Amino acid sequence: MIDTKRYISFVILGVLCLLSTVSMGQLAEPSQLSAGKLKKIALNAERYGDKYTALAYYEYYAKKKGDDASVQYHLGELQESLRDYKGASESYLRAYELNDKDPQGLYDHIRMVKMTGAIDSAKAKYENFNDILRKKRYSSTWRRVLKTEIASCDTALGLMADSLDVEIKNLGANVNGPHAEFSPMPFGDSVLVYGALKENEIKYYRLDSATTRRRFYISTKEDEVWNEAQLWDVPFNQGEKHLVNGSYSADGSLFVFTRCFENWKNEMTCELWQVEIENDQWGTPERLPDNINLEETIITQPALAFDQRKEQHILYYSSNQDRGQGGMDIWYTYFDKRRKEWRPPRNLGRRVNGEGDEITPFYNDAEKKLYYSSSSFTGMGGLDIYSSRGEIKRFAKPINVGYPINSSVDDFYFALRDDRESGFFVSNRAGGYQMINETCCDDIYEFRRLDIIHIEMEGFVMNVEDEEYLRGDGDKLDSDAFSTDMLDGVEVSIFMLEDGNEVLMDKMTTGGDGKFFVDFEPGKEYKVVLARDGFYSNHIEIDTRDYTESVLLVQNVGLSEISDGSVVLENILYDFNSAELTSESKATIDKGIYSTLIENPGLVVEISSHTDNKGEKAYNLNLSQDRAQSVVDYLTGKGINSDRMIPKGYGETQPIAENANPDGSDNPDGRALNRRTEFKILDNKVVEEEDLYED
């Protein structure tokens, strides 16, 4: 079966083609050596991680042992480890032809065919494999494997049929070289910082020699052409350690990066370090604590995010530490402002992580979306880029970002610009600047989505009368109403409703003009909540699933100041001598009181009912109590906690108008005013938000 751990060999440094810059010194010409000597040199080089030398000598050895299936199969493994899919496909097939009792070679041959992009051909070969299973009587477990692989081909073909409208460009020779480039970090439209090993050829070094180090480079864009990259001029971009991945915080005050070095076993070890930045001055790099940088563990590929609720940094990264789901996983930690320390890391769980490898996380704060690459899920092939909406421990089901950003080979290191329409990714797809085969090494590609539409909303927030707000008319204001009394200091929170969760996307606060502006994604449901201390909150619901073109929506909103007195709720009516609410009254309650209690979950209120003075006092008192109770019962039936509402009947004891005229005649208008339902605030409790950091 496929061994997903093959990815481990290059996720440590973020590159595959760079691991062979360490060799055993000057070696003999392969054509002059015996089979035994060739094998010894090849296996020795492989043991030291020098895959290039291993392959060069093993190819000569395989020619001398052309009839040995195990030799041909191991040649295929070496070729696959260097991502020579065509060569590996041929070697695996030769291994199977030499020993058709073991179907592993045939399976791996077809797998490599798919990696070359010939997905239709791979599907046909998998289906033919099913027929061979019956004839050769291979193990029945292969049927389940083939079923999964055929479904994988169907998924890939479906992604290709529903391809993205996107423009993709290789950044060119001024950025990409024969070795691999990685970890793109965009700054605006025309600046890119990235990691690379600047070598133009394969070089072999003695173990005790000084090898070329991976460094950060910077390139600028002019007239759609990326200029020749220069070494990034920051204090820590030097020394004996490899520098391979980096991530800025949203406010630019923190930079986290990976330092790698060879340990005493000649194994690559990586650690996460941080640098604080103040007034454009870089501080001294500091190693993250031991509870993150675990011994004998791969710790790499940092991605910083920002928690707007608690105003603290979150750090996602990739690691194979214990308690994971399998292979490399995405983990997270956060900087506890109160304790002034990074907290012990946690795994993001099974929704994000699978049995394969999850690497190269990138978090986009504006979208509240984690982008990462995975070999665990059914996709185009190799490593595919996925996105998952959420934060900290709560994420939605991952979604494949689509073809042609994802290809049949390895696609990773996805990074968006601020416009969310364009960005970068890394791929070893054919057509780049390669060194030993057409898919050996990684280049940085730039993309721009051409199918993005913009759905925007702007409006003003102003102070409105409480009666108007409690009628549910606070979000039905037209522009003419906004002449005075604009509200500043209103917190505008944008929530996306996705996968059963309300995901906080962004926050802003209105200025003196009371204006707010929101940018939505198409095809989603949103709730925009507007709140200010001492005022009733309000919200707007927006569904962008029906919009097919860019649009600017105008929506003005009114908030009302919470007062100590009672407010008359108009149009709460009952039948004569009855406590039963009319259908018109229920509609009024839904629009007004119910919405108010939903908008303001901390409110505790008294709902009171009053009568005129017709009839017995005791009867009126009981009737008013029953009527107040009927309102509470109706709201309880709609999900409002009964502890938040106190029904109170006052009968005829608190008139607000005369029941009779001065001459003693009946005053029907006064009696109508006295027959009323009122709303009074008793308490406004603080409702604690769910702490996503706590299990």
Image (spheres, helix red, strand yellow):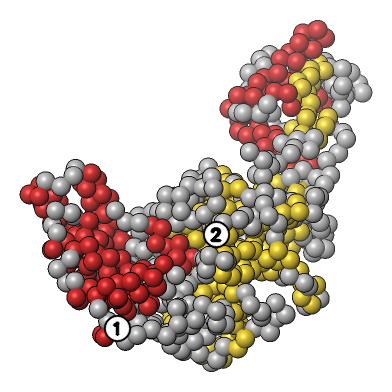
**Residue shown at 62%/55% (left/top)?**
294
Q: Mark 2 points at which residue?
A: 298
Q: Place residue 555 in its image quadrant.
A: bottom right
At label 2, the amino acid type is: Ile
**Residue shown at 60%/28% (left/top)?**
638
Q: Position of residue 317 (x, y in %)?
A: 58, 59
Q: Is residue 69 left or right of residue 305?
A: left
Q: Is mark 1 on a helix, strand or loop?
A: helix
Q: In this view, does 133 lie to the left or right of 463?
A: left
At label 1, the amino acid type is: Pro
Dot 1 crowding, Cα within 10 Å, few <14, some 14–19, many 20+: some
Q: Is residue 664 visible?
A: yes
Q: Is residue 588 left or right of residue 11?
A: right
Q: Is residue 381 above or below residue 502?
A: below
Outermost right residue: 662
Q: In this view, does 402 lie above or below 239?
A: above
Q: Name the residue under label 1.
A: 30
**Residue shown at 82%/9% (left/top)?**
617
**Towards the viewer: 142 or 628:** 142
**Towards the viewer: 254 or 57:** 57
Q: Place residue 676 in its image quadrant.
A: top right
Residue mark closest to the camera, 2 vs 1: 1
Q: Distance between the residues labelled 2 and 1?
A: 35 Å
